[in-house]
Amino acid sequence: MAKTVRVGIEIDAASSAELGPLIESAKQHGYDYVTTPLTNRTRQLAARLEGDAAAAVPLGLPENRAFSLDQLVLDRVDWASSVVGRHAAWADVTAKDTADYIAAEELLQRETAWATHLGLPAMILALPDLLVDVPSVARYVSQTIATASYTQLWVRASTSNEAGIQGMAAATVDEDGNWECWSLLRLLCGHAPSVALCLELTADLPDEEKLDRWLAEPIAAVVLPESVWLRNAKGYPVLSRRHQAVIHRLLSRSVEVIVRAEAPVAEAQVAHYQQYVRHLAANPPPPSHCEAFATGYQDYLQAPLQPLMDNLESSTYQVFEQDPVKYVQYEEAVYRALCDRVPDAAASETTSVIMVVGAGRGPLVTRCLEAARRANRLVRVFAIEKNPNAYVTLQKMNKEVWRERVTVVWTDMREWDTEERADILVSELLGSFGDNELSPECLDGAQKLLKEDGISIPASYTSFIAPLSSAKLHAEVAALPSPSRHETPYVVLFSAVHQMAEPQAIWTFEHPLRSSKTHALIEPRMDNKHNVRYSRNTFTLAQAAMMHGIAGYFDTVLYKDVTLSILPSTASEGMFSWFPILFPLKNPIYVPSDAIVDVHFWRRTNCKKTWYEWSVMVYEPTAPSFNVVSSRRRLIAASCIHNVNGESSWIGL
Amino acid sequence: MAKTVRVGIEIDAASSAELGPLIESAKQHGYDYVTTPLTNRTRQLAARLEGDAAAAVPLGLPENRAFSLDQLVLDRVDWASSVVGRHAAWADVTAKDTADYIAAEELLQRETAWATHLGLPAMILALPDLLVDVPSVARYVSQTIATASYTQLWVRASTSNEAGIQGMAAATVDEDGNWECWSLLRLLCGHAPSVALCLELTADLPDEEKLDRWLAEPIAAVVLPESVWLRNAKGYPVLSRRHQAVIHRLLSRSVEVIVRAEAPVAEAQVAHYQQYVRHLAANPPPPSHCEAFATGYQDYLQAPLQPLMDNLESSTYQVFEQDPVKYVQYEEAVYRALCDRVPDAAASETTSVIMVVGAGRGPLVTRCLEAARRANRLVRVFAIEKNPNAYVTLQKMNKEVWRERVTVVWTDMREWDTEERADILVSELLGSFGDNELSPECLDGAQKLLKEDGISIPASYTSFIAPLSSAKLHAEVAALPSPSRHETPYVVLFSAVHQMAEPQAIWTFEHPLRSSKTHALIEPRMDNKHNVRYSRNTFTLAQAAMMHGIAGYFDTVLYKDVTLSILPSTASEGMFSWFPILFPLKNPIYVPSDAIVDVHFWRRTNCKKTWYEWSVMVYEPTAPSFNVVSSRRRLIAASCIHNVNGESSWIGL
């Protein structure tokens, strides 16, 4: 969907007299605003910072708390909506000398106060190049956001630390330096959601994984310096495909764009940058079927359905019945199962019994009938549903669509007392994590309806997990009122997230339950302990990341090679019935580069409810060390075990 | 002070028939209780665990939830007070097979339920040898303590991983293995205060630092196996001096002692172990003056005094006036200052003016008069005090003790309007952290009372910090009701703590304020910004530890080499006026071995109040890595900045 975008341009006005015409010019060139320093480097402001202590007026004295007009670049309130301020670059809060850093802090404070007074939308502050300088800046940021006002604080960082690498700092900076500094700032500020990033792109963008990590940060604005712009055949500024892709992703999240057009750009060309950005905004890549369906759901937390405890509403059925993939695959699975079960030769004399358990409003019933028609097989179809409201619709469907060919039964599939036995048991009780809507328990209960050699569709389903970084989702969870918010899974369509590693399978459920030796059906344990699962998964990560939670997915084998999947790598194209699931962490864990993340996952039950528990450990492959006899990994961090005993979240049986 | 101690003995009864006589015998030998398995390894219980799945009765079925009599070692409630249970050693909750670990968990749960029913004081569960096995055990521990009952759960670990090192596990265990496993368990259990340690001592105790780290853990009981016992000349069991020292430290914290007397210990000797332990308990090392004074204050959190905002009570003065060291040193400082200031030759004609600011009930005034007498110098003494109640006592002292030789003034030292100027300004406004009772601000205000060449006693004071591990203190802070509890400093006499590194100086205040160039007195800044401080301190740690907070200390130069100190390494012997101060961390940080801990500390002010902010970063010295250009340290963890803007804790000006 096309988006409007706010586009600003960086200027360097040295005085109020310069600023007016520059704003005027920017507006004429189609920019929404300029970014500019608010103050100029007058003698009074800069003397202390330039070491001329004698000349410096003590900034902190009450009589000097107000700016004088000649110190200000921005001195008119009517310009406020056209300006995003930049904090004085020479105000070094990391200075060694106490008087120096206090003077710098005072200048920043006075700039913030002035920006707040004028009602500027934001002030931009530079992220330091070195880890050791971050705490002083983080302290200033924490102090400022703690007294949060209308004016936002944007911390500016570049996608790669070119200055740091080239400059004298090279000895202490790696190519992840900026990201590490940004991470430290976020940790020191307690992951405060109001710390926003102003991300400057570089001409050489980092590799996809590093870029992905940046794009999962809370970005308020993106800066496009002159160096990222190419020229097309007609001499107009354009972006490379990779830069375009980044801008498209950010525009979909309403990020602002700031252009930096440096000399020798001709006056006549200045407008072209914003025109190009607006062109991108007006022409986003076409949305996939799923994206079109899911507009507005990105990064929105939903409680997982409890279809066993609750009766779904008609609108919920309505949404899911529109899925263009799921029912096609179910029909194909039933079709193949019917063909396999009854040879062509016996097609006219053998009737297969199909039971659709949890039939809802009947879409799978329709597909079973269609599969039988296509396969030219005789069937008797039962539709079993516990929801009394959906049962009304099933009766109506039977009368009006299925021509009374279906036996509709209103009961809990686990409790139906009948002599009928099914050749094929069809169900769709799957959640985003596969087993999280209690498909295993329901099908255990329905298994008595199946003939000894009967077929369950689905035949199996597998849950997958991956470590996830998302400051956005962490903030969303933290903003919820429930004290158990951090120990509850959420269904969510991921957008501003960075998946730190490829998902791994954690466990599988197969249906029906058969003995591994005799292959005979076995009766489920009364205490449900056979549906308990535990898995430890090891993810080896090359790059550092802030881990905020665990992403959950599933895939399922409906019948033989007829499958469904919501795993990013194998996802069924166009299917939207399931978004992924998020298991959050109470406290984000910083994972350094080249670390090992162990995720321990439990599926537990106590006859009344089923729940998940999860915990994360971070290890390092150890280098030999003088006091270590021999070891392969070394603990460096661990979360608590979340949701012990299902005290915060569970699914009722 | 002599303590009574509960002493138990480990036995291995295989049945109820064996247990009775063994309890009887233990009692006769003077033991308070035995530790024993609660269940025996009958076929039903052990079959599943021994791989005989066919023979195993599914433990989880409701009809099998009760123990049968022949499965129980402890089957009588009247023995409950004489027994601490040991969980079945063969119940392996880390088993690979689901059915196996579920059977193991069920056995543990049933044992816990039985122990709770009987009202046993505790059950002992073994800590696994390998990190990878800890999560499964931690899950069981979390689940059990979440439904906490009278019966405690003690996790048993040995001070060194002898089994691990000797066994096949050697490839994955370093000599810190047990401690690392214990730390992981604590992390996974969310630092729950109810997880207690049952610590088994080994014959070769670890080095002092490692031992110190163990002793800072929440220890409920200590196990003394046969291997730690020596024999004295008469053949009686005794402990080495190091083992004795450990036992003395633990007995002072009411830890229980469990003896393991293995064959071939003669029946007649069994009593000797407990007799020896009780002998140690009855003969503790003599307490220091400070310990005698501070009994009951160990690990007790106190809010720091606010003597500027609040008026101290008489009892508070009473306590501190008993200090046997502080006043001696003050007298000596004044004595030397008087001697230096007035040559012997001028002693009879020159009068020195001494002002005691913040005189309280007058102990320093008395010392000044005594110093003048000893020095044979003429003095005029002023006692300035803002507390109207203390002022009454000062007048009484002047009349009855000082023979009206003192001018008593009731005023805030910062506001006294007088022409008098002091040769020597004496004050004791120091807190546990030096400047935390606002000595800098008060003396700034009093500085106008001093002659241009006058002397301040104290001349300077320096704050010190050290990273601190203390599960006990973390639990104490967490139990406080205030939401700002983790961002507030506490005065506390450390006991169950492990100081992770030697303290380092962070900043110094000197009095009076003089120009560094001209040495002339300078007027303090009205906005108090000259009393702002910032320090970054780097601690290099060899061994891993769980960091719960920062310990704060101070020392002070009263005059030349007359000093006071509460630093452990230079502490003024016998002085008890100041306990250390604790700055807690919201979330404990696990610090792996060979890491670097950076502590950033701020002293901030805003004219109305002064406060501290603190944060902790953990780095590693980096090994070269393929994707790192060049770097010397790598971030692995960081806390937030605590108490930003003094929102949680501050000292009023």
Image (cartoon, coloured by chain):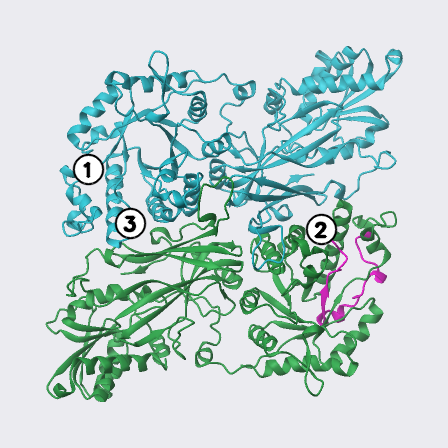
Chain colours: A green, B cyan
Q: Residues within 10 Å of mark 3 (few under 14, many from 20)?
A: some
First-in-chain label (3 vs 1): 1
Choose between B403 and B259: the one closer to the eye.
B259
- On the image, which quarter does residue A354 sit in? bottom left
- Give coordinates of residue A11: x percent, y percent: 76, 71
Choose between A171 and B436: the one closer to the eye.
A171
Q: Quadrant of the C terminus of chain A?
A: bottom left
Q: Element under label 2?
A: loop
C-beta proximity under 8 Å, tags 2 and 1: no
Q: Chain of mark 2?
A: A
Q: Chain of mark 1?
A: B
Image vertical order of residue A94 relative to residue B276, above or below:
below
The structure residue drawn at horizontal position 46% and vertical position 63%, both measured from the top left corner, is A501
Which numbered tag is attached to residue A94? 2
Relative placement, left or right, of A375 versus A14 is left
Disc 3 target residue: B95
Q: In this picture, which residue range is highlighted in magenta? A: A64-92
Disc 1 target residue: B40
Image vertical order of residue A361 relative to residue B64, above or below:
below
